[in-house]
Image: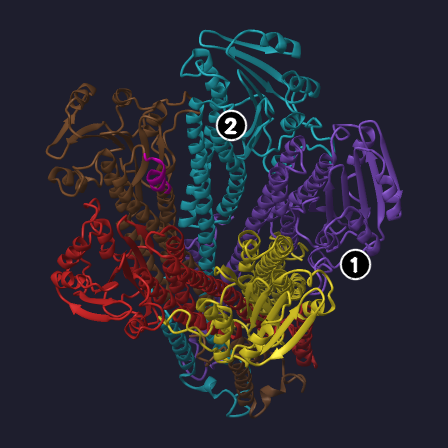
Chain colours: A red, B brown, C cyan, D yellow, E purple
Amino acid sequence: MKRPQLSNFFHGHRAPVGAVPGTLLLHPDAQQPVITVTRYDLERVDTQIVKTIDEIKALMNGDYRVTWINVDGLADLHLITDMGDLFGFHRLAMEDVLNITQRPKSEDYGDFLFVINRMPSLNANDQVAIEQISYFLKKGILVTFQEDVGDCWNPVRDRIRQGRGIIRQEDSDYLLYALLDSVVDAYFPILEHFGDKVEALNDRILERANPREMREMHMIRQELISLRRAIWPQRDVFSSLMRDQKRFVGETTAIYLRDCYDHAAQLMDLVETYREIAATSMELYISSVNNRMNEIMKVLTIIATIFIPLSFIASVYGMNFDANKSPFNMPELEWEYGYPFALGLMALTAGALLTWFWRRGWIFSGKDR
Amino acid sequence: MKRPQLSNFFHGHRAPVGAVPGTLLLHPDAQQPVITVTRYDLERVDTQIVKTIDEIKALMNGDYRVTWINVDGLADLHLITDMGDLFGFHRLAMEDVLNITQRPKSEDYGDFLFVINRMPSLNANDQVAIEQISYFLKKGILVTFQEDVGDCWNPVRDRIRQGRGIIRQEDSDYLLYALLDSVVDAYFPILEHFGDKVEALNDRILERANPREMREMHMIRQELISLRRAIWPQRDVFSSLMRDQKRFVGETTAIYLRDCYDHAAQLMDLVETYREIAATSMELYISSVNNRMNEIMKVLTIIATIFIPLSFIASVYGMNFDANKSPFNMPELEWEYGYPFALGLMALTAGALLTWFWRRGWIFSGKDR
Amino acid sequence: MKRPQLSNFFHGHRAPVGAVPGTLLLHPDAQQPVITVTRYDLERVDTQIVKTIDEIKALMNGDYRVTWINVDGLADLHLITDMGDLFGFHRLAMEDVLNITQRPKSEDYGDFLFVINRMPSLNANDQVAIEQISYFLKKGILVTFQEDVGDCWNPVRDRIRQGRGIIRQEDSDYLLYALLDSVVDAYFPILEHFGDKVEALNDRILERANPREMREMHMIRQELISLRRAIWPQRDVFSSLMRDQKRFVGETTAIYLRDCYDHAAQLMDLVETYREIAATSMELYISSVNNRMNEIMKVLTIIATIFIPLSFIASVYGMNFDANKSPFNMPELEWEYGYPFALGLMALTAGALLTWFWRRGWIFSGKDR
Amino acid sequence: MKRPQLSNFFHGHRAPVGAVPGTLLLHPDAQQPVITVTRYDLERVDTQIVKTIDEIKALMNGDYRVTWINVDGLADLHLITDMGDLFGFHRLAMEDVLNITQRPKSEDYGDFLFVINRMPSLNANDQVAIEQISYFLKKGILVTFQEDVGDCWNPVRDRIRQGRGIIRQEDSDYLLYALLDSVVDAYFPILEHFGDKVEALNDRILERANPREMREMHMIRQELISLRRAIWPQRDVFSSLMRDQKRFVGETTAIYLRDCYDHAAQLMDLVETYREIAATSMELYISSVNNRMNEIMKVLTIIATIFIPLSFIASVYGMNFDANKSPFNMPELEWEYGYPFALGLMALTAGALLTWFWRRGWIFSGKDR
Amino acid sequence: MKRPQLSNFFHGHRAPVGAVPGTLLLHPDAQQPVITVTRYDLERVDTQIVKTIDEIKALMNGDYRVTWINVDGLADLHLITDMGDLFGFHRLAMEDVLNITQRPKSEDYGDFLFVINRMPSLNANDQVAIEQISYFLKKGILVTFQEDVGDCWNPVRDRIRQGRGIIRQEDSDYLLYALLDSVVDAYFPILEHFGDKVEALNDRILERANPREMREMHMIRQELISLRRAIWPQRDVFSSLMRDQKRFVGETTAIYLRDCYDHAAQLMDLVETYREIAATSMELYISSVNNRMNEIMKVLTIIATIFIPLSFIASVYGMNFDANKSPFNMPELEWEYGYPFALGLMALTAGALLTWFWRRGWIFSGKDR
């Protein structure tokens, strides 16, 4: 099941507080499992979809070099419990399989290696959905659990089927690598998608900042936070697989895992770079808005400041003091050149203010554009 | 006692500066202790509530595999001192039990292991209250001290009573693990509660920012600071228990503690993610406010800038210069088309200003919405 | 001497650049030293105030288990030099004693252990004054130097006098621990004092932000910077004493020092938590101010935007165009319903604007409160 | 191919998700390769441009001490694959050569050492283009792959040709050092270029802040983010070459590599310093804009606040109440000193307001400039 | 040569990209070297200024314990090359001597120890100039290179001449320590100078914020960035000298170097503290500016909002509708109490608005001061 972002990403379906560790619990949206068993060695490949544990048991008897059991969908608690028992997986690990909010990690349980990582996909609203994948590695056996049908592993399946690369010469540890590698590589197109958007927004903000762009940038930043959270621990997983799990991971595969590690490091680089660019863009946006406000205020101030005194002068000469009653009462109204005098006074005032503005660099300076 | 947040969280009841180390001191709000002794092995379970040290002593004689003594409430100094003496706990550790503002930690005192962690709960005002729990672990014995009655351990008690899981097969170290695990898991619903609120606020701020939302976000950020402070050192506690305390913690339990460690790491992830989201939301909020201010200023500026010159023109023709006294005095008033001329002048001015605004993109551009 | 904050805290009285290392130099405000010699073992305690080196020498001959020589005030260069020589302390260490701006540290000089930490106190203006304390530890001997009379050690002195705790059973390393512990514990009430103020300010800012609160918060932040600077290196001192100085610090004392280390860690936690709360409060304050500005601007804009067009209409009909001269000149003035028409025009304009504001959510929306 | 910034820098041409590891894939803009084989020892130098693998093979037979094969342009997939096969390079390494978005790294593949770093150049728009360079080191052989023709290695070629320095006395590891060193040194002029611009902008912002400067600063900050991303991992490459690759890197060369490491550290210092200066400049800019807004608002407020009451007074005496109808109707208009009284009232009002402003420090204080 | 800040500090005179490593290159402003040879042992001191390499050679023959050759000025490339050859210094180290933008570092070249640190001074404009100093240490020999005449070492020279301290008893490693120590101590007065300015500015900003203060604070912040860049790596130099260079640095000197290390740590503390204070001051400044803007806007809003409606009323009664033509045309003008009615209407409006402002807390609340 591909989930919409954040809330579902974080809110798993956890066993109640204090439950027996290893309590298996169904996620409410879990899908009915589809089990695919792929067996291969250098000469043969065989893929079957099975329904019951007994069918799996039957298939285990073949003497193929590698058996890969992939379970899509986690809704059948009984079946999954049985599978754990069949292979002797620890209940704690099985609990982690079903609790789909685990951090990527790798754990050595003595007789098997347990790995979790997270596979990303992009939904229709440009939001990242991140599916948890669990891997159990034993010599010659790899069991994988996905939340639902649909993954990025078809190219690996093709390589097995067609015998391309060295996959059919190697043991199940190489298969584990091939699957992990596909998952890590699936982040690149998604990150590039966000990278393109960050850059486009950045360019648009540089040109002219609008609230819509800002809101989009904000949403991308939150997606990047999710992605970082998913990628960051994967790096540690790879480095731990390379260094500490020599019992499960062979020499050849370790060299290939170094490649995964590099890719994870590169992904972190990209995420951090985009986050930084997004953050400086937000700063730029805020300062652009401030700037535009400045400009608006300047226009208002200039217009208002010039016309307010002029209007005042006009108002004065609009007063109705009775010039007939007293020679002190607005003699200007009776002057021959009274009106031109008033206009001149206004022109003078306006001129003085304009000069003052010009000397402060507020007008005609061409500097602020 | 569940305490309201911050002040009480930070202000413990500390022994006076320079007091004898190990001075036992009563917290003023401390409750009368309720002592529960639970003894069990694979076949038997026995739970009793006792009142005196002698009763405890009597119960210790039974040959159960594990004895768990849980003390709820720290008000009876005498009794607690006696318990410490009974089991030979160091005075420094006993002091920490009573001083309820300790950081989570684990300390090896030679003949017992001393662990502190903090159990969260959510009070009615959506504030986190964090209770200190102290654990003393010896072979076959676990003594726990809580500040008051009420905890998240009932599922563990049920498991003991009903013999579910492996708890009755294992020693007291596994019991310690089971209790620690319950405490860590108790953080998840609380964090998810805040996570939901952060996301809801984030959505509301994206849509339309109000000061109320901002204030709420501010309060959640402070709760997250408290939570981080409580969770962060627990991770170190688990890793130290797994790695360094092999004398007290067996192989089996160590594997389970790895699970606790993972959960603590996941909690830190969640806290940090919510903090980051909250922080970027605050940024968005601030830039939204700026933006709205911008909009308001633009409306004011446009209206004022257009009407101020028009009003000025009207004022001019409202002046009372006496046209009879001189041909220079406001001849426009006498013109046949004086009034239309004045109105036309106003229309022209308004048109020019509107054009100018339009060319600056301030009106009719549809860009800023 | 308790010093006011910052400038004096940072500006020590340093030997001139390039001086012989170990140059002893008097601090200008240094006080005349008061020397107290306390000798004790399990049975006996003896405290004397002495004036000369010879008196000290005489007292050293007694066969007490521990001799503690405490020097309050550093003004007598000669006496202090002689004391250094008497006990064979390295000149570099003696220089550090007098240069009262040292960072807390512990140094192994081969035949003695040299420790510096800093004792806080709160002066009348709520400012932190931080006094440097130097400790020289040898087997059975502890020499301490304080800048001036007055410290937080009286409870330790009482414990020695009254033989409470294990202090009289242990060697001088335990005395060192007891003194260090008192100093660390002296930070708690001060931090709690600032914590209370931070929370009170935080609440007041949440309710209604004023510049006064902001300024107070700013000053508290600076005090917290000083405190962090004083506390941070103390943690390293304790961990180094516990781990590296086994030659000077016995097994028993090391367990107690772990307690000091915990306290220092807890202090750092508190400082960081308060700093974070103060920082988010500042953010909240700024956004509150922005918000209030927004509100003010809105009122201005609404009032101005409504009345400016109305005033314009009134001004138009206040023009003096002579209706007698021409039928085009303001015929409205002659209309029977001219005045009601003008008032109606105004009411219409005002109504239109109010509607527009209402639809933008600026008035009557009840949303922004 | 020198690429414009960001998008191309980040968006490589990656093998599809899940492809066989080591899949060689052509970058769409890749150029036809030009292969230069340079062979030298103490006495001889020989440089040839070759076209085919066979030619290379032929040249390998010579008994020169060092053979350097430099490939400019990656468009001929077939040829590059053949080269990898010829020298026995691992397919994963060959994939990295073609996937031109690798992080700088050094990897030990057992029989050869694989190094990647990134060579910067500045394009016409002052944007950084960063080309990936791959190095394969074996005893006596160095194979380098560049994305396109044009590099910063001519001085090294001259040194080889002219036998300056010790380059012709040393093995291929020294050649590797010489090339890496040239690449690291190529960052200095570019960083200095940006440094000059940052400082010039900083000075201009200190003097008078304009949006244009801010936008430029923003673009430089983004270039610095790219540069940091390119430089940061190079430091690790050098330290790993010095410490871990003793099998490939001799004693002498290791000393020289220490120099590279120092240069990379110095570059990081420069990048971080410029970033900090740019960040504080942005802060200064924002506060300057705020300040100027303040100033503008003050002018508006002073002018408006003074004239609004004056205009009001004038308006009052412009009302047309009929003084003849009633003695209460504007008797002032009939007073002998009515007009001077009105003017006086205005002067008084203006004076009172000016005084108030002056006492608030808004005018004539000379403080804010 | 003391250099002005930033540009020159960062832009060294580097060998061209790809040059032979160890290329010696003259800095354009380099001064003619002045060479001082100081020889001493416990009994004798001898200081001579020499001009040629041969003179140095001659002086080396004396059997003094320590020979210190100090070169002030780097302009004579030939002479410096010869000196390097005379003592067998590696060309890479000699290149670093001339390239005066090195980071502080210490490097073991097998037969000599090479150290670089940076000596600060304050020029007339309160800007920090930082000179590079290079040290070559061999048993009994110390060669130092400074960019130009003038340093902070006169006290060390005096100590040698007068035999104060233990300098004449110790080997050249102690001399190295003495010089390094002088350089580190030279940072204290400079940092205290900036510290005083930061605090003074901080106080002034607390009282009343002006743009001038902000600009000064900005410049100090940049100086602090430079200082941090110079100090930070020195700490590593001292710790590496203490721990790793036992071959060159004796036991006694190592104890003294611990002192240098402490001083460098203390310097970093000071720099970081001042930087934090400066940063919070900037925040305070910005919020003060916002606040003052708030205040200004409030005044404008109150005055404008009160008088705009009043003016409107006055304008209405200034309209010229002809009351004679119709009873509907402004009958108020004819009322007996028309004028008092109008004034009353105005008073009412003003009163209502004032009440409203008062209830919002905008006036007479005394809260915002």
Label 1 resides on the chain identified as E
Callouts 2 and 1 close, C-beta under 8 Å: no
- Which of the two residues, B215 or B345, is positioned nearer the viewer here? B215
Bounds of the magenta span? Answer: B236-246
Would you call the spot at circle 2 few (<14 residues within 10 Å), some (14-19), or many (20 or more)?
A: some
Q: In x, y percent, where is residue A343?
A: 66, 79
> Is D269 located above or below residue C105 in the figure?
below
- Which of the two residues, A13 or C309, is positioned nearer the viewer here? A13
Report the Cα–Cα distance between label 2 and label 1: 51 Å
Identify the secondary structure beneath mark 1: loop
- Which of the two residues, E368 or E325, is positioned nearer the viewer here? E368
Q: In x, y percent, where is residue B160?
A: 15, 38
| Residue linked to disc 1 | E26
- Verify whether residue B52 appears in magenta: no
> Is C312 located above or below residue D363 in the figure?
below
As shown in the figure, which amino acid type bears the numbered disc 2?
Gln
Q: Which residue: 66% across, 9% down?
A: C54
| Residue linked to disc 2 | C245
Q: Quadrant of residue D214?
A: bottom right
Q: Is residue E234 left or right of residue B164?
A: right
Quadrant location of the N terminus of chain D in the rendered image: bottom right
Q: Which residue: 49% across, 60% down?
A: D107
As shown in the figure, which amino acid type bears the numbered disc 1?
Leu
Label 2 resides on the chain identified as C
Q: In x, y percent, where is residue D142?
A: 58, 66
Chief secondary structure of the magenta portion: helix
Q: Which residue: 24% across, 52% down?
A: A93
- Which of the two residues, E272 or E136, is positioned nearer the viewer here? E136
- Answer yes or no: is residue D321 visible: no
- Verify whether residue B239 appears in magenta: yes
